[in-house]
Amino acid sequence: PIIEPLKNKSAEFVKSIGNLYLQEGDFHDMMSKKSQYFLHRVRMHYQIDTQHLDDDFAKKLQLKSEESEELIQEAISLIKKSTDPYASVTKEDLIRLNQVLDYILN
């Protein structure tokens, strides 16, 4: 008999988890997780310390990523908003954070 290999359902799983997050509507938590992932990638890929998101961090990230200073400042502002437990976060904030961080990483 021919045994068919198991199908890779990783993409379906990720899509399901993403939909659950969106249905719950906890945009602050999603922004926080996306920010943590981004900062981890910055540490690993660009070898930049992410302990303090200050002007020195912004300058190093801007030089290594070759992105505009305005984009880097917007990213830092959104990341700080995601780490503030009292900040009011909207769906639009999450979408913009995702766009900005993905643009910087790619």
Image: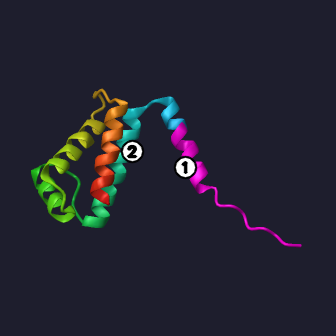
Q: Earlier in the sequence, mark 1 or mark 2?
A: 1
Position in image of residue 82 (x %, y %): 30, 38
Q: Which amino acid does label 2 sit on?
A: Lys
Disc assigned to residue 14 = 1
Position in image of residue 27 (x %, y %): 40, 33
Residue 63, compared with residue 94, is above or below; it is below
Quadrant location of residue 30?
top left
Which residue is pictured at 32% across the width and 30% down the height?
Answer: 89
Residue in the foreground of this view, choosing between 1 and 36? 1
Magenta region: 1-19
Reply yes or no: does residue 3 show up in magenta: yes
Disc assigned to residue 66 = none
Q: Which amino acid does label 1 sit on?
A: Val
Q: In screen coordinates, is 3 left or right of 52?
A: right
- Mark 1 is surrounded, within 10 Å at the Cα level, by few (under 14), some (14 to 19) or many (20 or more) other residues, namely few
* Picture quarter with the C terminus: bottom left
Reply yes or no: does residue 37 show up in magenta: no
**Mark 2 secondary-structure assignment:** helix
Residue in the foreground of this view, choosing between 49 and 73? 73
* Picture quarter with the N terminus: bottom right
The residue that disc 2 covers is 33
